[in-house]
Image (cartoon, rainbow, N blue to C red):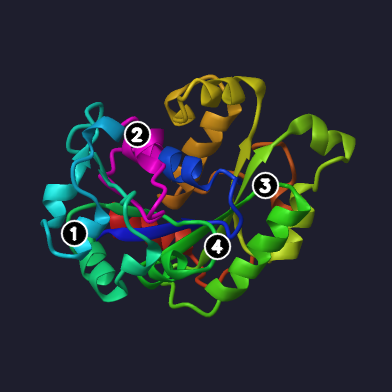
Amino acid sequence: MGTSIVVTSGKGGVGKTTTAANLGIALVKNKKRVCAIDLDVGLRNLDTMLGLSNRVIYDLIDVIENRVDVNQALVEHPDFKNQLYLLAASQNATQSNLNIARMQKIVAQLKAEFDFVILDCPAGIETGFKAAINVADSAIVVTTPEVAAVGDADRVVGILEHSALNYGIHLVINRVRMQMVESGTSMDIQSIVNRLSVPLIGVIVDDDEVIATSNQGQSIVALESDNRAAAGYLNLARRILGEQIPLNEIDFASNSLPQRSSKPGFWQRLFHRNN
């Protein structure tokens, strides 16, 4: 039985969908079978990030409303055959079409077939968010080192703490600009972790190469081998799989970070469940 992970943020524009896409690729590179589900009904971006837009025929709402079976709607990634699949969001529906009972059955079926089901959650805390957390085993909260983003993440963490997540909540800090951290013009990592009181599982360092790649319509930096963002996504996947890799992406003291977790042993338990 696989594990479902919701990638959420509360605030739009923090790189949540980019994180979901790159985490999926990073898990595939670690020989796991992954299905990514786009819950951002009405917008649909995950297919673009994964380069699958032209391959989408059926979508999540088609499955929820019983027009097709879930396996008919899955889009296989041509570069990762039998390893990476997408269940795209509908562009012609609204979040009110997300039936939570049907979502639970769909995700349960996919967990029986895949090692990981990654749920790309829409921004905000409306129906899409509620549907995502109702079918997730764990949550990754994505924020950037900005006051507004951290404030919204704090609100989402407060809601997630009252949900039934088997493996708890973990934090990814995205788009960390080293020059801004060093100059004190950005929130530092320790302050963010202290504010959210959620175990940190990943830090994604931003750089000019990553921005240029994104502007060219290529969002999967996890396929690269020579930039720190790619290393951050690969380390994130390896930590989820149970490896105790030091949180040294920006060379801060990992032993000073709070160790509190709603489910102790998250990495190890998740590793044994999916290995």
Q: Which residue is mark 1?
A: 63
Helix, strand or loop at mark 2: helix
Q: Which residue is mark 4?
A: 124
Q: Is residue 11 magenta?
A: no
Q: Position of residue 106 (x, y in %)?
A: 22, 64
Q: Amino acid at mark 1?
A: Val
Disc 1 from disc 2: Cα separation: 28 Å
- 127 or 232, which is in the foreground? 127
Question: Which badge, 2 or 4, is on the more N-terminal residue?
Answer: 2
Residue 232 appearing in the image: yes
Question: Which badge, 4 or 3, is on the more N-terminal residue?
Answer: 4
Disc 2 from disc 3: Cα separation: 25 Å
Judged by depth in the image, the label closer to the viewer, 1 or 2, is 1
Q: Is residue 156 left or right of residue 272?
A: right
Judged by depth in the image, the label closer to the viewer, 2 or 4, is 4
Q: Which residue is mark 2?
A: 29
Judged by depth in the image, the label closer to the viewer, 3 or 1, is 1
Residue 248 appearing in the image: no
Q: Amino acid at mark 3?
A: Thr
Disc 2 from disc 4: Cα separation: 31 Å
Crowd around label 4: few <14 · some 14–19 · many ≥20 (10 Å): some
Q: Is residue 27 magenta?
A: yes
Judged by depth in the image, the label closer to the viewer, 2 or 3, is 3
